[in-house]
Image (tube, rainbow, N blue to C red):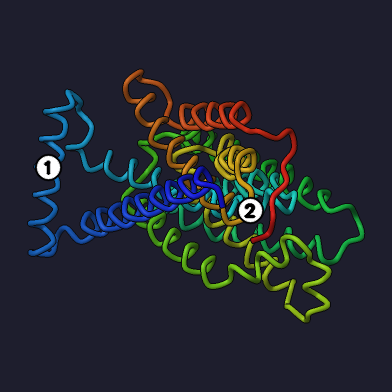
Amino acid sequence: MTQHHSLRRRLEHVGIGLTAILAVAMVGLLTIDALREAPVVGVLYEQARIAGWWADHYLGTNVFYHPFMWRSIATGILIGVVAPLVGTYLVHREMALIGETLAHTAFAGVAVGLVVSATTGWNGSLMLVALIVGVLGALGVQWLTERTDTYGDVPIAIMLTGSFAVGTLIISYGRGMTGFNVEGYLFGNISVVTPSGARLMAVITVVVVVVTVATYKQLLFITFDEQAARVARLNVTWYNTLLIVMTAVVVVGAMQILGVILVAAMLVVPVAAATQIAHSFRETLYCSILFGQVAVIGGFVFSISQGLPTGGSIVVVAIVCYLLAIFASSRSTAAISTH
């Protein structure tokens, strides 16, 4: 291993370590926010607000004192971890569009939740309804793929268009009675991030990271040689279903910040950038998470400073990272190992 490669690997490990610390801190912050009514936790909550006030004072901002901004930033940082993590498997399996499909399915879930809430007075979490519908949609895609003889992307296209069609019909029906709007869910909006939605994202992050670490070898096997995995008697159907369900739950969480239209970008663009410079699957995984963090943090800074939409800002920064990775790459085609 050359000195350059050794330094690069150390930098990647340091970056992943710092990202892990940041992600744990964000989960902790959301936990404090959720349990702030408890006496001991309430003290920590007030100290966190004071720290946010001082941060705003020294930075000349009006961001860190407000709990709703904590939730939005924490949710965004967690998205920057789990979306590229799951997206790395999807991109290498040529399933990049599955994220877009499941986002449209989750949108139908939001539409159902909005109509039910408006007509019955139910005040439950829309994200929970979207999560349930998204998981059902993921299972539906998997069922169609396993039981039809059509090309692999046909069930995905059917579910993408069909779920969005159902969502638009439900929205049109409900809008005539209640006058609600769904623009925040379509295009993303930091004000859409509710306390329950932020807590849901924290739970999703912990579960997805733990499951991915526990099944890393199996998911890697089916990603690069599904037929050999079947010969080795690995339960390929189960792991395919697991991957697509994880994608669904990540999409639902990310939809709060990025919206239905842009959510697939965080599954694909950081991974595309990582494949330009990485030499192994594991390195692609690490680099995609680092690019995801750069996109989220850079997008938040740009959107807050310029008063622009957060979702679009995050995606634009991610694309800039991708273009820079292309220029920095020393090869014209991706050639990674499975190690």
Which numbered disc, 2 or 1, marks the residue closer to the eye? 2
Q: Secondary structure at mark 2?
A: loop
Task: Report whether residue 119 is seen.
Answer: no
Q: Position of residue 12 (x, y in %)?
A: 46, 48
Q: From the viewer's perspective, is residue 319 above or below residue 28?
A: above
Question: Is residue 176 or residue 53 the one in the foreground?
Answer: 53
Q: From the viewer's perspective, is residue 51 above or below residue 227?
A: above
Question: Is residue 110 or residue 33 the one in the foreground?
Answer: 33
The three-letter amino acid code for the residue at tag 1 is Ala
Quarter of the rendering containing residue 264: top right
Count the marks: 2
Question: Is residue 238 or residue 106 the one in the foreground?
Answer: 238
What is the quadrant of the C terminus in the image? bottom right
Q: Position of residue 118 (x, y in %)?
A: 44, 46
Residue reaching furthest to the top: 306
Name the residue carrying label 1: 51
The three-letter amino acid code for the residue at tag 2 is Ser
Contact, mark 2 vs mark 1 (Cβ under 8 Å): no
Name the residue carrying label 2: 280
| Image-based side of 179 in relation to 19, left or right | right
Task: Report whether residue 232 is seen.
Answer: yes
Q: Earlier in the sequence, mark 2 or mark 1?
A: 1
At 11% across and 56% down in the image, what residue appears? 44
Q: Position of residue 324 (x, y in %)?
A: 56, 27
Residue reaching furthest to the right: 149
